[in-house]
Amino acid sequence: MSTNGTGAGTEDKHLWPLWEVFVRSSRGLSHVHAGSLHAPDAEMAVRNARDLYTRRNEGVSLWVVRSDDIIASDPQDKETFFESPKGKDYRHATYYTASEGVAHL
Amino acid sequence: MSTHDLHGSGGPHGSDAVEDEFAGVGDTVASATRVTPGHALRPEDIALSAAPADEDTATYALWLGDDALILAQRLAWWISRAPEMEEDVALGNIALDLLGHARSFLTYAAKFSGKTEDDLAYWREDTEFTNLRITEQPNGDFGATIARQLLFATYQELLYSALTSSTDETMAGIAAKALKEVAYHVDHATQWMLRLGDGTPESHERVQRGLDVMWPYVEEMFADEELTTRLAERGVAVVPSSLREEWLRRVTAVIEESTLSVPTAKAALAHSRAGDHSEHLGYLLAEMQVLARKHPGATW
């Protein structure tokens, strides 16, 4: 039951580390982030996730990931990361009209 | 499946909002944005649709219902008191699972005498309760509660597994629903036994003490009664002693893997099925029953 995290939130060895929970609501759909929880290790994290996030029949599959292991984009980078696609409507399928004579598109 | 038959055998389903809202749709319309409660045997179905039990079967249902009810009440105490909030919810969930099993068994038991689950839960005295002694024992510390969970949930898993082939369709249906839940309770207890037993010297010592404190009450789980023998001949009940060998094999495996020792304490004298209880049950019932008795018929 190693807690090998070194990042924020795990400085106090008496605190259980934080985990992010992803729930697949039914077959064929993606796992979606549902929330977070504390657990001493991975096996307990997936059980706590079951108890916290699937008790109203919300899920058929669970993933848990140590919060420390998630690399997130920096909110400060919003402009450089996310504003370039704006206005580029030709990147959307709806920009294009179907060619004449194409029956199935 | 008997559970399906029970659910589908008609009868008005009253004003249950969940039933009305999702009537006939089940899981077929579940999607990313719509979650349904799903279908399972519910106490309301038993009250409406199940054929009434005979006297022996009703008494047997009462026994199993009392076990689940009293342990549910014990475990509910942990909410807000467990080591972490996540564990509050885990133990609370287990308590609610057990309360669900109790509701089904007590509803079935009550039907025989024209009563309701609430009549049995709230209006009986301590000497009328038939729960096994282990279920009413004080929680002790977290280690003792986990030790009891391992011992009792393993017993329930074996019992319900055998009961799924009961010749009594309702008992088989309740057991089938409960079996999946108690299997999770065994897993929960096993995970904690491993971590506490093989954790720090303090956690090891405390969970061992928990096992030692609960062990005198395990023998009663496997005591055969005239009633169980009679019902087993008809294929309705399980002979308690028939579960003992496999139970001991399973709990021994977990205890030893947790680097703990199987206790050698002698069995406590107890005859809970006849209404003999420890002093702890009266206090538990006082708390559980006070609201219903002070405000008869109260709803919310």
Image (spheres, coloured by chain):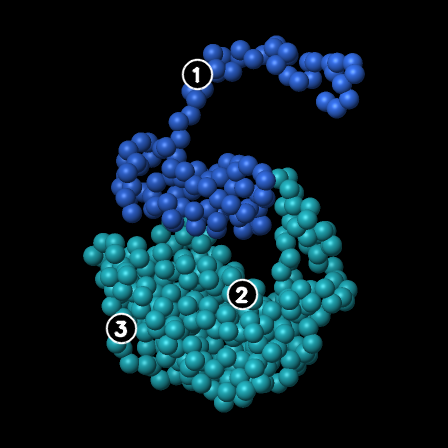
Q: Label 1 is found on which chain of the structure?
A: A
Q: Which residue is mark 2?
A: B178
Residue B5 in the image, given as x and y percentages of width and height: 69, 67
Mark 1 belongs to which amino acid?
Answer: Gln
The one of B295 and B299 positioned closer to us in this rendering: B299
Residue B88 shown left or right of residue B169 in the figure: left
Q: Colour of chain B?
A: cyan
Q: Nearer the viewer, residue B290 or B83?
A: B83
B227 over B9 or under it: above or below = below
| x, y percent for residue B97 | 52, 61
Structural crowding at the residue carrying mark 1, measured as other residues with C-alpha within 10 Å and reported as few (<14), some (14–19) or many (≥20): few
Using the numbered discs, state the Cα–Cα distance from disc 2 to disc 3 in whole angstroms: 29 Å
Chain letter for blue, please.
A
Which sits in the foreground, A22 or B202? A22
Residue at position x 36%, y 68% in the image: B250
The quadrant of the rendering that contains the N terminus of chain B is bottom right
Is residue B235 in view? yes
Q: Which residue is mark 3?
A: B263
- Label 1 – label 2 distance at C-alpha: 51 Å
Location of residue B92 with respect to A33 vertically, above or below = below
Judged from the image, the secondary structure of the residue bearing numbered disc 3 is loop
Q: Position of residue B39 (x, y in %)?
A: 64, 57
- Which amino acid, mark 3? Pro
Do the numbered discs 1 and 2 sit on residues whose CB atoms are within 8 Å? Answer: no
Residue drawn where x is 69% and y is 17% of the image? A94
Q: Considering only order in the chain, which callout, 3 or 2, is on the residue closer to the N terminus? A: 2
Per the rendering, the mark at residue A76 is 1
